[in-house]
Image (tube, rainbow, N blue to C red):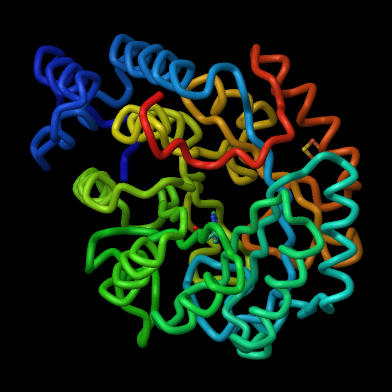
């Protein structure tokens, strides 16, 4: 996609932006018009300013923090963009033991984290029973903490088991809401319909649910992005994870161009306005593409950061994309570094669970 291409005319895209800001239901045409404003300074600033206003209205200057524990990089899937896809023979595989996971939580708790995110590849080693056991252990040891899972596609029954064990939230990016684009990014047997069903199941079970997509992934167009926004509007997730696509050297997309920071920022503002109370991270991928990427994300509507709590010895092996930041830094260092970064743009890193605001306040 040519990221600087603009077909829009100012009256048209400003009209769509005003519609978004006023909270009206958006049609595909509205989203297409909104996206046609990308690259225009006036709409970019308008959307960012309105996004920040809405974010302040609900969350003030608070930025929530999540301790990310990447507990396994084994994966049975083969997503074409991902460095830890099962078919990558060069990936150095690891699994954390239950004890190691708990140690990460202990350390995180001392540093003030009140949400832990257990993220991993789709690793059959961690059966539902094993996962439920770990979830129960974490929730009983840290009853004041929220637990988020990010372990891929599962059956309704499995999600139910994990929810009953105490998991509060679930991250499962949809990656793209366009069928053909989904097929380009994911080989068989993965399918967009299963992915979407998982998200609806998770919602039905009462999880706080996170969807999201990479920005600038190979094959992405303005049309597929409009479809992503249509899907987010329909799903109404509580969280949206969005970062630029970054090529990984051991994937078939090694030679592709990375996604743009500017477009990611533009979309962050749009998503904040589309889902006003959404929990929206300034992602590590954004920080990887631009040294001040996360700060820029916070300045256009993001309100969450997710530093890494995984043991240093495994960090560099959770290698989703090239040049990932923070692979050599102690959790405490990242925590302090982020505190400074968040403060530098006028916000405050807080140590609350940071749940979704279910009701208007
Ligand atoms: N570039 C950017 N993001 C990636 N992810 C996976 N591979 C890449 C990549 N090459 C994202 C996916 C996934 C999340 C855990 O990381 O969106 O859902
Ligand atoms: Fe990890 Fe800055 S957040 S070193």
Q: Report if residue 177 is visible in the image.
A: yes
Report the quarter where the N terminus lies.
Answer: top left
Closer to the camera, 152 or 131?
131
Q: Position of residue 8 (x, y in %)?
A: 15, 24
> Vertical placement of 281 versus 139: above or below?
above
> Vertical placement of 91 versus 229: above or below?
below
Closer to the camera, 343 or 315?
343
Closer to the camera, 68 or 132?
132
Count numbered badges in the picture.
Answer: 0
User: Is 234 left or right of 153, judged from the image as shown?
Assistant: left
Q: Quadrant of ligand 2?
A: top right
> Vertical placement of 181 versus 361: above or below?
below
Q: Position of residue 358 (x, y in %)?
A: 41, 39
User: Is 196 left or right of 76, judged from the image as shown?
Assistant: left
Q: Report if residue 323 is visible in the image.
A: no
User: Is 105 left or right of 78, judged from the image as shown?
Assistant: right
- Say which residue appears at 17% left-offset and 15% top-offset: 14
Closer to the camera, 105 or 326?
105
- Say which residue appears at 51% left-offset and 59% top-offset: 171
- Say which residue appears at 54% left-offset and 28% top-offset: 297
User: Is 176 left or right of 211, judged from the image as shown?
Assistant: left
Q: Position of residue 158 (x, y in %)?
A: 49, 82
- Say which residue appears at 87% left-offset and 41% top-offset: 111
Q: Position of residue 149 (x, y in %)?
A: 59, 64
Report the quarter where the C terminus lies.
Answer: top left
């Amino acid at each position: 996609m040519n990221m600087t291409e603009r077909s829009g005319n100012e009256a048209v895209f400003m009209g769509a932006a005003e519609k978004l800001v006023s909270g009206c239901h958006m049609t595909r045409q509205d989203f297409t018009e909104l996206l046609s404003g990308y690259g225009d300074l006036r709409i970019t600033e308008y959307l960012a300013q309105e996004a920040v206003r809405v974010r302040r209205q609900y969350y003030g200057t608070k930025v929530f923090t999540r301790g990310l524990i990447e507990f396994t990089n084994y994966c049975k899937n083969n997503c074409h963009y991902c460095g830890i896809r099962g078919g990558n023979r060069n990936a150095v595989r690891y699994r954390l033991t239950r004890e190691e996971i708990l140690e990460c939580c202990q350390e995180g708790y001392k540093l003030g984290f009140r949400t832990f995110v257990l993220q991993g590849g789709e690793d059959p080693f961690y059966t539902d029973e094993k996962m439920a056991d770990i979830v129960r252990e974490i929730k009983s040891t840290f009853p004041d903490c929220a637990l988020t899972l990010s372990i891929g596609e599962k059956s309704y029954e499995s999600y139910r088991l994990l929810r009953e064990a105490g998991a509060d939230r679930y991250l499962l990016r949809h990656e793209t809401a366009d069928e053909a684009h989904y097929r380009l990014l994911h080989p068989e047997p993965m399918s967009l319909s299963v992915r979407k069903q998982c998200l609806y199941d998770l919602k039905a079970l009462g999880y706080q649910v996170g969807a999201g997509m990479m920005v600038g992934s190979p094959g992405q167009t303005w049309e597929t992005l409009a479809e992503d926004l249509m899907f987010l509007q329909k799903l109404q997730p509580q969280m949206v994870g969005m970062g630029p696509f970054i090529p990984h050297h051991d994937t078939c997309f090694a030679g592709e161009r990375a996604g743009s920071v500017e477009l990611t920022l533009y979309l962050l503002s749009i998503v904040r306005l589309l889902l006003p109370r959404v929990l929206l991270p300034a992602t590590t991928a954004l920080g990887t593409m631009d040294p001040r990427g996360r700060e820029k994300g916070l300045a256009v509507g993001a309100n969450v950061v997710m530093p890494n709590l995984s043991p240093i010895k495994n960090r560099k092996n959770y290698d989703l994309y090239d040049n990932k930041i923070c692979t050599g830094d102690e959790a405490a260092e990242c925590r302090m570094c982020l505190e400074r970064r968040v403060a530098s743009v006028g916000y405050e890193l807080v140590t609350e669970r940071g749940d979704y605001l279910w009701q208007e306040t």
